């Protein structure tokens, strides 16, 4: 279950030194970063089972090494158009409140070491759906990286269901 | 809280439960010294431990109780008050223990002077010792012999020296009569004088039996089996070498891991199956066996005897008996039947409730029992046994049985069913209504039961764990409830089905049968309006496509009429789930759904199949309730028809089509009269000869406007209701079709306006009910005449009886339209009066469900009279079951027509009268 997992302790050390490691992913051409200690693994989702009557963002459920993982279609979550074809989809496995989730993304990028101080707040005019799940922005050379706040991505959905 | 205290709490709670049971037994058999000894020792142990742990309050209470029991042992009379007092003390001790646990080992402050002084007073009052030890006689003979056996048996290590000492010590204590010093325990040493060897031997033997590692097992047995085992059990806490206490969570985790193992094994097996000559085959086979055994073993750790759930019952029954002034004996059979502890927890409360119910409602008072020739003491019998992967629990009483008439009355009062429908039901079907929500037949609400929440909750609780509950009752003989529950919740046997390319698992428990349907086979899907139904053994089974229920993409539009129907029963609802394919059955481990998906009531969980894919598990309860609402919302008009067909009394309810025409107030016509709803392009509406017409199915259909205010649209389409009769159609132009509702129709205000029958309240709004009979001649002036011409020579007199004003208003004109001279009566008595006065009719159409004299009786009466022996009589009924049709024939009806079947009625009338005419001519 821990292909690229890092212990929370390590993450804490990272933040002490002012550096945060991010796993970067691409969704609809945009670069996103997930704090590395949140990411359990990266996998290729296979044989996904649709879940009728579920929220549109829920892509389905799948078996990842004996655990049932709920897959979230991040494009839909962000209000982006669906990708044509099914080539090379990837998922980032995360744990949230004791359950396993897989965020379906387009592509995984490299792991970046970024200075915590370099984080900027969301621009005020950011699309509401994005602002809702973004934990800030990092200016990188040549592009911007939006920090994906896992709690908010999933918490909001769980919350919606409860309501 | 330290371990010692924790251990003490668990152990003491268990001991106290046993004391409860034993005391009740003791009360019934006050001379049974063994029971008394047992109780005495338990209380004594509690007292001793309390002293040791420094819990003075508990110690004082236990001491006082012990003293009183000591008096019993000396031969004092055992009175009900005394036992009650001891029970009260036990309750107090339990209360203190609970607080103790909550306060992490801090003994709650407080005084128990009240109880203690009562106990003391009672002990003082009890008479002086009267030696009566029958057991002392038997023991001496065996003395030495047993001791020798002991010497040998002790060594193998099964029973430790400690225990033996303890056994000795306790027997010694017994001889000391009242050993009230806790120190006595500490200082215990084998006291050679007067050792009860027989007892010691018995105890050791019992302990050998106890070697069974499942320490909980003995617990329930003690309630009914011999003293030996009870003793062994009471001591079991110290048998540390044979059993250990394990945290439930640890077991749960173990169970989950084993489930994973099972799944992985299944996956491996699946892979190996595909590769014929794999070298993995043999080791995998072994892995498979080991896994199976491991699974079984772990399952076993979760198993507990059902007696654990029964343990509190003797006490409850005893208290009830006192409160209700009844004599009740509680028989418990099969207390050692084991089931999953999770299930056990869930079944506890329903069981208690049902036993209470039996005691309260089921059993009669002693005087009533005597009158009906029974013993004064009523019996409640609890029995549990295994049957094919299920546990069956029976709760039977030998009381008065369920009161059929009161239940019927209640059903009608609560509007759960009509009287006519009740007539069709078997007694058992009627009894089942006691499980309906809010149903209680208890004439008065007692503190015990009768609040009408009980049986409903019982059923719900049992159903949530996938069980069923059934009952049988015989008047004056008693009632038996039978609960059927699965052994475990963790593993479920399911049927794997396919719908629109996705697979789903349906728990086998609710699957009754599978039916394959094909367009040209015996079983085919028929439709009432758009609602699919299946004829299955003379019954109409409502069908729901799983795909539709789950709202999965049905655009593929496969042949909807071919596939499989999974006939399911949930509670007393039976329905068919239409699926595309059925695969096989598979034992699956239910995994809870992710929180994000838990709101979907249609699924109870998901799991990983042998091939590694995830599958959703359909929740039969969710489906059943979804169907309930589906029927209410989108099944529309079929409802009335289907219900009538199913035999549901629908006299009062009828589907109405609501629309607007000319005014904002809604108007309505009975949906059964409407042939179809159409919308025509405005361009298609033609004008000819001063009236509007459309070409409809190859002929011209005249359009009629209910009033001048109906908006004639300039463009788009014009909605209309089409009425057809005998090949002619008429379009009634409306502004808007609003809704279809099912409501009881009661025309409250009559009307003088032509074309309006009157007004009724529908959906809380005053609604005009249109008289279609008025509009038909507007479309075709000869609508009625035409028929009158054809039957002019034989205009026949028809008598029509119906107690419902609505049907009188609706069908009267219809029959008139068919060329009959209709006389309408609202009851059989009115009709008989008319006939008695000499009125003659050519044909009689009678409703069946009428108050006072029903249709059957009316027909029978007519047939007995020579004058009406040959008059054709047609029955008109909302109920069209084969049984009722047969009954109708027997009563003398010539035809039996469904109330909503207007063409059927006309056809029957034509047939009967023409045949009649033919003969006459």
Image (tube, coloured by chain):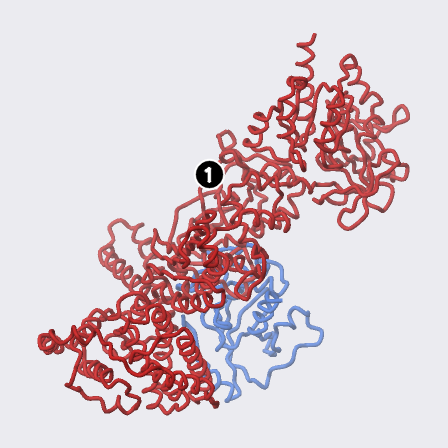
Is B490 or B789 nearer to us in this picture?
Answer: B789
Chain in red (letter): B
Q: Chain of mark 1?
A: B
* B669 relative to B547, above or below: above
Q: Position of residue B563 (x, y in %)?
A: 49, 39
Q: Colour of chain A?
A: blue
Q: Position of residue A78 (x, y in %)?
A: 62, 65
Quadrant position of residue B17: bottom left
Q: Which residue is mark 1?
A: B515
Of helix, strand and loop, which one carries label 1? strand
* B510 relative to B452, above or below: above
Quadrant position of residue B422: top right
Tell me if residue A44 can be seen. Answer: no
* B566 relative to B189, above or below: above
Tell me if residue B172 can be seen. Answer: yes
Relative placement, left or right, of B71 versus B882 is left
Identified at 37% across, 67% down, the residue is B308
Is B375 or B746 nearer to us in this picture?
Answer: B375
Relative placement, left or right, of B748 versus B65 is right
Is B502 or A144 nearer to us in this picture?
Answer: B502
Q: Quadrant of the N terminus of chain B?
A: bottom left
Q: Name the outermost residue toward the top.
A: B921
* A61 relative to B71, above or below: above
């Amino acid at each position: 279950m821990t292909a690229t997992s890092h212990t929370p302790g390590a993450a804490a050390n990272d933040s002490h030194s002012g550096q945060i490691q991010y796993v970067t992913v691409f969704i609809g051409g945009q670069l996103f970063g997930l704090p590395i200690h949140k990411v359990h693994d990266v996998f290729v989702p296979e044989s996904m089972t649709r879940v009728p009557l579920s929220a549109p963002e829920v892509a389905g459920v799948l078996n990842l090494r004996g655990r049932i993982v709920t897959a979230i279609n991040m494009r839909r979550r962000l209000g982006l158009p669906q990708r044509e074809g099914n080539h090379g989809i990837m998922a980032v496995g995360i744990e949230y409140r004791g359950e396993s989730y897989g965020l379906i993304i387009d592509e995984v990028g490299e792991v970046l070491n970024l200075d915590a101080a370099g984080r900027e707040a969301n621009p005020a005019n950011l699309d509401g759906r994005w602002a809702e799940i973004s934990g800030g922005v990092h200016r990188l050379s040549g592009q911007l990286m939006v920090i994906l706040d896992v709690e908010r991505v999933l918490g909001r959905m769980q919350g919606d269901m409860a309501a | 809280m330290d371990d010692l205290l924790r251990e003490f709490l668990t152990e003491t709670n268990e001991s106290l439960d046993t004391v409860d049971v034993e005391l009740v037994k003791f009360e019934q058999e006050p001379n049974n010294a063994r029971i008394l000894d047992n109780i005495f020792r338990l209380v004594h142990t509690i007292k001793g431990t309390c002293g040791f742990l420094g819990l003075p309050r508990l110690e004082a209470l236990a001491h006082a109780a012990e003293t009183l029991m000591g008096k019993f042992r000396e031969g004092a009379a055992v009175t009900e008050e005394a036992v009650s007092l001891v029970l009260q003390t036990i309750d107090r001790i339990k209360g203190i223990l609970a607080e103790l646990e909550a306060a992490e080992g801090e003994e709650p402050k407080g005084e128990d002077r009240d109880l203690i002084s009562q106990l003391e007073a009672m002990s003082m009052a009890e008479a002086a010792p009267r030696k009566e030890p029958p057991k002392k006689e038997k023991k001496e003979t065996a003395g030495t012999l047993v001791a020798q056996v002991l010497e040998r048996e002790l060594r193998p290590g099964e029973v430790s020296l400690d225990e033996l000492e303890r056994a000795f010590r306790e027997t010694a204590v017994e001889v000391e009569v009242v050993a009230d010093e806790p120190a006595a325990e500490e200082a215990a040493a084998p006291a050679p004088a007067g050792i009860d060897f027989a007892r010691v031997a018995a105890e050791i033997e019992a302990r050998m039996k106890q070697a069974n590692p499942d320490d909980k097992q003995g617990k329930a047995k003690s309630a009914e089996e011999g003293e030996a085992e009870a003793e062994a059990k009471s001591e079991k806490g110290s048998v540390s070498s044979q059993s250990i206490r394990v945290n439930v969570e640890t077991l749960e985790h173990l169970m989950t891991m084993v489930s994973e193992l099972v799944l992985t094994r299944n996956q491996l097996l699946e892979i190996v199956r595909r590769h014929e000559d794999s070298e993995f085959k043999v080791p995998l086979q072994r892995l498979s066996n080991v896994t199976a055994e491991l699974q079984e073993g772990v399952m076993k750790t979760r198993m507990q005897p059902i007696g654990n759930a029964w343990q509190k019952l003797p006490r409850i029954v005893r208290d009830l008996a006192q409160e209700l002034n009844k004599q009740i004996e509680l028989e418990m059979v099969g207390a050692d039947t084991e089931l999953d502890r999770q299930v056990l927890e869930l079944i506890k409360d329903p069981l208690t409730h049902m036993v209470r119910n039996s005691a309260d409602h089921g059993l009669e008072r002693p005087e009533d029992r005597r009158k009906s020739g029974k013993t004064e003491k009523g019996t409640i019998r609890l029995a549990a046994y295994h049957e094919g992967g299920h546990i069956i629990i029976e709760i039977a009483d030998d009381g008065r049985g369920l009161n059929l008439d009161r239940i019927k009355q209640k059903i009608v009062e609560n509007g759960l069913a009509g009287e006519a429908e009740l007539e069709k039901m078997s007694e058992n079907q009627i009894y089942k209504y006691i499980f309906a929500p809010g149903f209680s037949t208890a004439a008065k609400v007692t503190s015990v039961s009768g609040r009408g929440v009980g049986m409903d909750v019982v059923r719900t609780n049992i159903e949530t764990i996938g069980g069923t509950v059934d009952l049988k009752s015989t008047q004056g003989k008693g009632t038996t409830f039978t609960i059927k529950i699965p052994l475990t919740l963790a593993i479920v046997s399911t049927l794997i089905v396919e719908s629109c390319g996705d697979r789903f698992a349906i728990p086998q428990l609710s699957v009754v049968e599978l039916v394959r349907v094909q367009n040209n086979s015996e079983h085919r899907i028929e439709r009432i309006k758009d609602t699919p139904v299946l004829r299955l053994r003379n019954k109409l089974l409502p069908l729901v496509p799983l795909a539709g229920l789950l709202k999965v993409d049905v655009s593929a539009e496969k042949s909807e009429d071919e596939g499989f129907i999974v006939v399911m029963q949930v509670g007393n609802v039976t329905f068919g789930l239409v699926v595309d394919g059925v695969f096989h059955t598979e034992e699956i481990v239910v995994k809870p759904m992710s929180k994000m998906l838990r709101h979907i009531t249609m699924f109870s969980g998901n799991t990983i199949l042998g091939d590694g894919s995830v599958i959703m598990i359909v929740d039969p309860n969710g489906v059943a309730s979804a169907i309930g609402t589906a029927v209410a919302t989108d099944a529309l008009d079929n409802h009335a028809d289907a219900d009538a067909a199913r035999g549901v009394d629908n006299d009062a309810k009828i589907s109405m089509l609501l629309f607007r025409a000319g005014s904002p107030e809604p108007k309505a016509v009975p949906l059964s009269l409407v042939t179809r709803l159409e919308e025509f392009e405005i361009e298609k509406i033609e004008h000819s000869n001063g009236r509007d017409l459309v070409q409809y199915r190859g002929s011209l259909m005249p359009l009629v406007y209910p009033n001048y205010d109906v908006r004639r649209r300039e463009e788009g389409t014009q909605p209309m209701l089409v009425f057809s009769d005998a090949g002619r159609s008429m379009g009634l132009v409306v502004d808007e079709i609003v809704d279809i509702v099912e409501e009881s129709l009661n025309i409250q205000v009559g009307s003088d306006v032509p074309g309006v029958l009157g007004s009724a309240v529908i959906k809380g709004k005053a609604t005009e009910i249109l008289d279609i009979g008025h509009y038909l001649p507007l479309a075709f002036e000869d609508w009625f005449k035409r028929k009158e011409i054809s039957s002019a020579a034989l205009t026949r007199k028809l008598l029509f009886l119906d107690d419902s004003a609505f049907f009188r208003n609706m069908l009267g004109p219809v029959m008139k339209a068919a060329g009959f001279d209709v006389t309408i009566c609202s009851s059989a008595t009115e009709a008989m009066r008319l006939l008695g006065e000499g009125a003659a009719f050519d044909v009689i159409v009678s409703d069946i469900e009428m108050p006072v004299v029903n249709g059957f009786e009316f027909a029978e009466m007519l047939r007995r009279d020579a004058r009406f022996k040959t008059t054709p009589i047609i029955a008109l009924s909302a109920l069209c079951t084969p049984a009722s049709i047969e009954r109708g024939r027997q009563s003398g009806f010539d035809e039996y027509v469904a109330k909503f079947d207007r063409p059927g009625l006309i056809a029957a009338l034509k047939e009967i009268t023409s045949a009649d005419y033919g003969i006459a001519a």
